[in-house]
Image (cartoon, grey):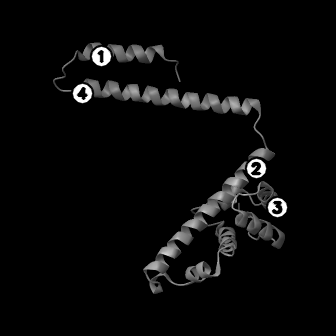
Amino acid sequence: MANAITMIDASTATALKDALKAEGATKTKWTKATDLLIAQGITSELLETRKDGENEKLRTQVKALIVTTFDAAKQSVLAKETKSLDTEGKRVKREATQEIGRYMRLIENKLKKAEEAANPKTKEELEAEAAASTKTEMQKIQALLDDVLGKIQKLENPSFDVAKAVKDVKAIKGSMPSV
């Protein structure tokens, strides 16, 4: 995503601040904010933390926007170096940093929901996902049964008939659909 948009315009910033200050109380503010973000080409994927740091400018801008919704005392504590703060200041800064993270996840989740609503999955896609998850569960069960077989065969001085246990586990595996 080398050409990712890294600037949020003023109207989008205002709408996002309004939504954050509303703290989920009004759906229309969030709808407006997410619609404006999407219209600018900003998606939930762009707000996710990336190892390559490619989207860090956008994330920094959104975090700065979040900080503007905090009261002046909290903003001043955030601006100071952690080492220069007393115990109470460090606690306030830690809580504010956690709050920024919560708001970032909230914005990402609101964007994801808006993106999904704009592009609903077809019946075929939903069925394919269901089949894939079922298949994944079957693969997990098959792997667990293979693990059980290996461990049963390696037991020293078991208190049960190993040959019968292996036969029973293989019968269970044989009765399952192949994956």
- Which residue is found at the position 72% from the left and 33% from the top? 125
Q: How many neighbours does mark 2 have within 10 angstroms: few (below 14), some (14-19), or many (20 or more)?
A: some
Label placed on residue 154? 4
Label placed on residue 165? 1
Give the residue number, with chain letter if any, for mark 2: 115
Give the amino acid type for the residue marked by disc 1 in the picture: Ala
Task: Tell which circle, 4 or 1, labels the residue nearer the N-terminal end.
Answer: 4
Give the secondary structure at mark 2. helix
Task: Tell which circle, 3 or 4, labels the residue nearer the N-terminal end.
Answer: 3
In which quadrant of the rendered view does residue 159 lie? top left
| Residue furthest bottom in the image | 84
Q: Is residue 176 above or below residue 87?
A: above
Give the amino acid type for the residue marked by disc 3 in the picture: Leu
Q: Nearer the viewer, mark 4 or mark 1?
A: 1
Q: How far is mark 4 from mark 2, CA to CA?
A: 52 Å
Q: Is residue 120 above or below residue 88?
A: above
Contact between labelled residues 4 and 3, with CB atoms less than 8 Å apart: no
Contact between labelled residues 1 and 4, with CB atoms less than 8 Å apart: no
- Which residue is found at the position 33% from the left and 24% from the top? 149
Q: How many neighbours does mark 3 have within 10 angstroms: few (below 14), some (14-19), or many (20 or more)?
A: some
Q: How far is mark 4 from mark 1, CA to CA?
A: 12 Å
Give the residue number, with chain letter if any, for mark 3: 36
Q: How far is mark 3 from mark 2, CA to CA?
A: 12 Å
In which quadrant of the rendered view does residue 102 lie? bottom right
Q: Nearer the viewer, mark 4 or mark 2?
A: 2
Q: Is residue 141 above or below residue 175?
A: below
Q: Is residue 89 left or right of residue 44?
A: left
Q: Is residue 113 above or below residue 21?
A: above
